[in-house]
């Protein structure tokens, strides 16, 4: 992820911009802003469109070990499907991710499995089908715990994982899990990244919980490529406080990450290594990193976000100097005739669709845009601000 006037390029947003036949999100009015966020994560982000009736979530957990871990996740997904109305399809065979299922699916979840060691890698036809579902159709893939372990024969999933299991603590090890909220080498992660604001808003800063904590083959934060393919638009989401438990070697200090998101073509992947123990039962008392976070991850991968608020970075001074508004198919800028105003627009797939420096113009209109969500970055001198706009 580059630190440029674009602000951020992570490919995460509210609506898919690709023209999909069977899985297209229907037109809908803008969903209401959630205004009840508290430190206990009280806003459950109930979907009014996007992920609900008529939408399928596919769960692949048929092989490998971790039987209890898979049961915990399966039970949590069943609760969520009953609450929000989406169809949960647990495939009956490793290679049963069919074109028929994918026609109305938006998320595929790989739970545990242990990769090649657990014989959880599907055949070539299914692998290609999954890859196209993510990279071409623009939907999402969630890997839970040992779903990113021992993968040798599927380069695409290796890249989606970013890093794989190296070592782990014993099950039931208590540790403090924290929401990431900082910039590293100029790249913002967690709450500091505007693309992750929906996923993390309102969650407690830290939670004490027990699990089988992973270390990795190499540092996930420092990983820039897998198998020669570059890793782009990586956002670290959760990390472990190594001072709160005796971490297995190697140690990463402040960079012991547990969950992160990245983009693959037009789609999104998330790896959440938490989930060996009954993470989801803990949600009943902590209202934090169990069902609540799992539900957000599903919607995040399906590009079904509520707009919380405009996102500002570095400076709020530009609010009083410029005006940005959205209309059907266009973005309007009021620039007040100032010079040296750099405007960049990025879509939800992380693609720059507009870039220009204005010198003296009072207004500008960016036309011909598809419906969806855009991030508009305005920069002048050392001030920079990013605003999120929705076109319907």
Image: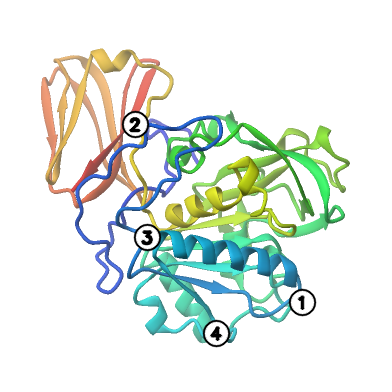
Sequence-wise, the earlier of marks 2 and 4 is 4
Assess disc 3: are there few (<14), some (14-19) or many (≥20) residues with their C-alpha within 10 Å of its C-alpha: many
The Cα atoms of the two marked residues, 2 and 4, are separated by 43 Å
Q: Nearer the viewer, residue 352 or 241?
A: 241
Q: Is residue 243 above or below residue 92?
A: above
Secondary structure beneath label 2: loop
Q: Are marks 1 and 4 in contact (CB under 8 Å)?
A: no
Residue receiving disc 4? 124
The residue indicated by pointer 1 is 117
- x and y percent of residue 124 in the render? 55, 84
The residue carrying mark 3 is 51
Residue 360 spot, x, y in % from top left: 14, 17
Q: State whether residue 154 is above or below residue 92.
A: above
Q: Residue at x 48, y 43 (%)?
A: 199
What's the CA distance linking mark 2 and mark 1? Answer: 45 Å
Neighbours of disc 4 within 10 Å: few (<14), some (14-19), many (20+): few
Q: Element type at marker 3?
A: loop
| Distance between mark 3 and mark 4 Cα atoms | 29 Å
């Amino acid at each position: 992820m580059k630190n440029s006037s674009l602000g951020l390029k992570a490919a995460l947003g509210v609506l898919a911009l690709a023209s999909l036949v069977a899985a297209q999100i229907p037109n809908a009015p803008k969903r209401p802003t959630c205004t009840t966020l508290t430190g206990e994560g009280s806003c459950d982000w109930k979907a009014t469109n996007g992920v609900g009736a008529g939408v399928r979530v596919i769960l692949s957990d048929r092989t490998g070990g971790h039987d209890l871990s898979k049961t915990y996740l399966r039970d949590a997904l069943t609760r969520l499907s009953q609450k929000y109305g989406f169809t949960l399809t647990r495939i009956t065979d490793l290679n049963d991710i069919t074109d028929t299922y994918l026609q109305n699916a938006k998320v595929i979840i790989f739970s545990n499995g242990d990769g090649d060691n657990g014989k959880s890698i599907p055949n070539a036809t299914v692998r290609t089908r999954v890859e196209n579902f993510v990279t071409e159709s623009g939907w999402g893939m969630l890997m839970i715990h040992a779903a990113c372990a021992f993968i040798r024969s599927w380069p695409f999933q290796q890249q989606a994982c970013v890093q794989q299991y190296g070592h782990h603590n014993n099950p039931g090890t208590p540790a403090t899990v924290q929401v990431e909220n900082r910039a590293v080498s100029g790249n913002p992660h967690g709450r500091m990244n505007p693309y992750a604001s929906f996923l993390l808003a309102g969650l407690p800063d830290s939670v004490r919980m027990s699990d089988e904590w992973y270390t990795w083959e190499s540092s996930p934060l420092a990983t820039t490529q897998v198998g020669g393919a570059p890793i782009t638009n990586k956002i670290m989401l959760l990390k472990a406080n190594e001072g709160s438990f005796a971490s297995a070697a190697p140690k990463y200090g402040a960079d012991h990450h547990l969950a992160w998101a990245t983009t693959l073509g037009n789609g999104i992947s998330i790896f959440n290594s938490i989930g060996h123990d009954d993470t989801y039962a803990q949600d009943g008392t902590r209202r934090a990193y169990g069902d609540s976070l799992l539900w957000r991850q599903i919607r995040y991968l399906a590009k079904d976000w509520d707009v919380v608020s405009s996102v500002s970075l570095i400076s709020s001074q530009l609010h009083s100097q410029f005006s940005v508004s959205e209309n059907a198919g266009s973005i309007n800028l009021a620039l007040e005739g100032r010079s040296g105003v750099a405007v960049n627009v990025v879509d939800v797939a992380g693609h720059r669709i507009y870039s220009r420096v204005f010198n003296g113009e009072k207004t500008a209109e960016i036309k011909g845009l598809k419906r969806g969500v855009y991030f508009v970055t305005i920069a002048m001198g050392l001030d920079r601000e990013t605003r999120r706009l929705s076109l319907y």
